[in-house]
Amino acid sequence: MTEIDADEAARHKAKMEKRKQVQDAEVAEKTVEKGLLIVNPGPGKGKTTAAFGLALRMLGYGKRVGVVQFVKGAWHTGEMDAFKRFGDQVVWHTMGEGFTWETQDLQRDLAAAERAWVKAEELLADPTIGLVILDELNIALRYDYLNLEAVVATLTTRRPDLHVVVTGRNAKPALVEAADLVTEMTATKHHFKAGVKAQQGIEF
């Protein structure tokens, strides 16, 4: 253990006391409690993973969570199996047909997005749900599979206490503007570039 002299310890204590005063005052100023519209965009990995971290937190407090996946197909994922263990505390809908370069069928992609949005509207209207995750909705909006203005209007007029997370690359500016919290995932380094394939427990 590093030895610290008495003067250094006293300076540190005084600095932290001042920091605590500033922090406590800042926290005390925040009095609004509301449902948040959270957007996780960006080219980096972790957008959906971050959303599911919030879902786990909500579940820990006994809240119900709804998930609609707009793009991902019905392939097997570890998170789906994990959330099934919460029973009816989680409402999960995988509505996608797979990525656009896999389907290669615009009509199918449009129809899938529209079906997913109908399901999303059902979850947004469910008063028993505390958090709705719209996974890769940003992709459906990027390709104009859904009407952006209608989607933003629905999200911004939802009930006041409902939290919503939207994930996917290339978030539209109108959605970013409407959001309360936007955290962009950047791609600093990715193992895929080094030839490492998608792996169980990491990518799915």
Image: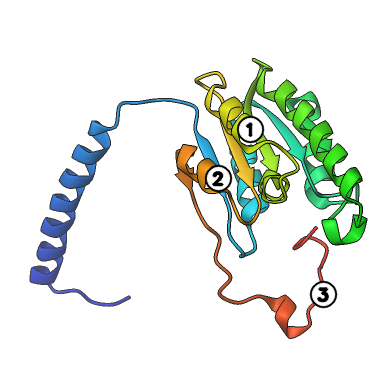
Residue type for callout 3: Lys
Q: Find disc 3 in the rendering and name its residue.
A: 197
Residue type for callout 1: Val
Measure the alpha-carbon separation of dots 1 and 3.
35 Å
Q: Residue at x 61, y 56 (%)?
A: 170
In the rendered structure, find residue 39 and report the number of the disc placed on it: 2
Front-most of 134 and 118?
Answer: 118
Of marks 1 and 2, which one's residue comes earlier in the chain?
Answer: 2
Vertical comparison of 193 with 66: above or below:
below
Visible in this render: residue 85? no
Vertical comparison of 53 with 152: above or below:
below
Front-most of 140 and 76?
Answer: 140
Measure the alpha-carbon separation of dots 1 and 2.
13 Å
Helix, strand or loop under label 3: loop
Residue 178: x and y in percent read: 48, 37
Q: Residues within 10 Å of mark 2 (few under 14, many from 20)?
A: many
Q: Residue at x 60, y 39 (%)?
A: 165
Vertical comparison of 193 with 58: above or below:
below
* Quarter of the image where one finds residue 96: top right
Q: Are circles 3 and 2 on residues that touch, CB within 8 Å?
A: no
Residue 95: x and y in percent read: 85, 39
Measure the alpha-carbon separation of dots 3 and 2.
27 Å
Q: Residue at x 83, y 56 (%)?
A: 99
Visible in this render: residue 169? yes
In the rendered structure, find residue 37 and report the number of the disc placed on it: none
Q: Nearer the viewer, mark 1 or mark 2?
A: 1
Q: Residues within 10 Å of mark 3 (few under 14, many from 20)?
A: few
Residue type for callout 2: Val
Q: Find disc 1 in the rendering and name its residue.
A: 151
